[in-house]
Image (tube, rainbow, N blue to C red):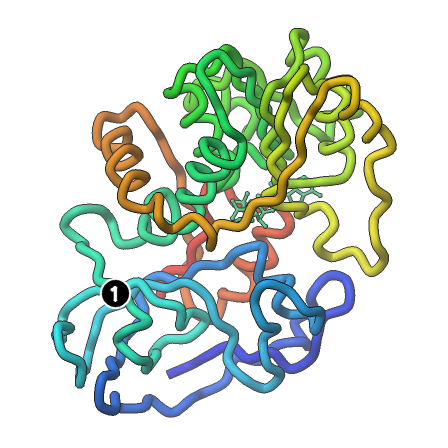
């Protein structure tokens, strides 16, 4: 089976030369292991961080070895109790066609209950990020005005809709194209949205949120964060979920210049990491699964076909080619 390997650590935007698509041996499962043929592979912005050597909450990818990431696939050989050939599992051996690993690292998923790809997106890691980030870290409460950046992406589109369904007074989103902005308002029920490429974020946010913002869910950083601090209401909360505008920077980006405003507003900024919140998984699946079935929460996926396009799909997420979760179908 083919797998993507990291050859060198990218400086700035990742280049094709930093990677190779190589043929790897398909390893039969040892005791307690399963062999899985991947059906859907996830590409996520955080993977850019693991391509660098810097210490973080997960170890860097190893040079010369296969990249990793979320994937769902079908078990084609099993030497593990409780997992049979034909079962489908969610696991971490992405960026490859076949993966062999300990069954303890896999979670069984039901392709009858929901399309397989959704376990990587709307019912998976990005969905839980939206749910836990907004409701727990953002301490969202009914009547709050919520602003989310990256609003047409996997996490952002769900943050905005959960806020709406939970009784936000106003939901505002920003995204990088006029088509995405239209989708937010017309299909996802945002009250206002703007294209951050059409003018200064601070000005556009003030116009879209004339009464200010109680919760800002940050996927982007930079100008967006500074603008949100500028529009923050008293006791406002800012959830730092992602900073995609700086992931390919070679030098540290300047911080917001208006942090002193947090004194005036008694505002709070808090970092968020989805791995801390898996205890909310059952509640998240129950509530969001219900909204999906009733049609109250909508989602899109951008599906790229073929393992050979895995790298392009990843670069596409960093560029904004995707609407909703970016997924590779093998
Ligand atoms: P998305 O589906 O939102 O895809 C990324 C989007 O970012 C692109 O579609 C693009 O949309 C936007 N983008 C790219 N560059 C810029 C830029 N310079 N300025 C503004 N927007 C930009 O990805 P995810 O939903 O998977 O992730 C969203 C964020 O959440 C990321 O920052 C990610 O790192 C973070 N995250 C954090 C987690 C945590 O535990 N802390 C867990 C999961 C995700 P556009 O066309 O609008 O520019």
Q: Is residue 158 above or below residue 322?
A: above
Q: Residues within 10 Å of mark 1 (few under 14, many from 20)?
A: many
Query: Do we see residue 68 in this rendering?
Result: yes
Identify the image quadrant of the N terminus: bottom left
Residue closest to the eye, 17 or 264: 264
- Left or right, 224 with respect to 192, comes to right
Q: Position of residue 121 (x, y in %)?
A: 39, 48
Residue closest to the eye, 109 or 302: 109
Image quadrant in which you'd find residue 91: bottom left
Q: Which residue bears the numbered disc 1?
A: 89
Image quadrant in which you'd find residue 192: top right
Identify which residue is drawn at 35% across, 48% down. 279
Q: How many marks?
A: 1
Identify which residue is drawn at 63% across, 62% down. 48
Q: Is residue 238 above or below residue 192?
A: below
Q: Position of residue 255 (x, y in %)?
A: 83, 41
- Left or right, 293 with respect to 158, comes to left
Residue closest to the eye, 134 or 262: 262
- Give the residue at the far top of this rendering: 211
Of the four image quadrants, the one with ligand 1 is: top right
Identify the image quadrant of the C terminus: bottom left
């Amino acid at each position: 089976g083919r797998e993507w390997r990291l050859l060198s650590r990218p400086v700035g935007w990742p280049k094709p030369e930093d990677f190779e698509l190589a043929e790897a041996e398909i390893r039969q499962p040892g005791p307690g292991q399963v062999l899985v043929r991947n059906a859907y592979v996830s590409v996520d912005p955080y993977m850019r961080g693991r391509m660098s050597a810097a210490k973080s909450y997960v170890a860097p990818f190893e040079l010369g070895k296969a990249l990793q990431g979320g994937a769902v696939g079908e078990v084609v050989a099993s030497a593990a109790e409780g997992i049979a050939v034909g079962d489908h599992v969610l696991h971490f051996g992405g960026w490859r066609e076949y993966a062999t690993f300990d069954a303890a690292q896999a979670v069984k998923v039901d392709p009858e209950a929901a399309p397989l790809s959704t376990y990587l997106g709307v019912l998976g890691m990005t969905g839980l990020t939206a749910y836990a980030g907004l409701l727990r870290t953002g301490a969202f409460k009914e009547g709050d005005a919520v602003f989310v950046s990256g609003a047409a992406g996997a996490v952002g589109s769900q943050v905005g809709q959960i806020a709406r369904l939970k009784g936000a007074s106003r939901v505002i989103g920003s995204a990088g194209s006029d088509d995405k902005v239209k989708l937010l308002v017309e299909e996802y029920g945002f009250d206002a949205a703007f294209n951050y490429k059409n003018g200064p974020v601070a000005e556009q946010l003030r116009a879209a949120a004339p009464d200010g913002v109680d919760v800002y869910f940050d996927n982007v950083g930079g100008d967006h964060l500074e603008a949100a601090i500028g529009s923050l209401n008293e006791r406002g909360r800012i959830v730092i979920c992602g900073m995609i505008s700086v992931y390919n920077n070679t030098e540290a980006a300047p911080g917001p210049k208006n942090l002193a405003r947090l004194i005036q507003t008694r505002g709070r900024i808090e970092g968020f990491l989805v791995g801390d919140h898996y205890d909310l998984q059952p509640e998240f699946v129950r509530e969001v699964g219900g909204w999906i079935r009733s049609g109250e929460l909508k989602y899109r996926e951008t599906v790229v076909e073929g393992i050979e396009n895995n790298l392009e799909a990843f670069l596409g997420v960093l560029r904004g080619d995707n609407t909703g979760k970016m997924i590779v179908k093998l």
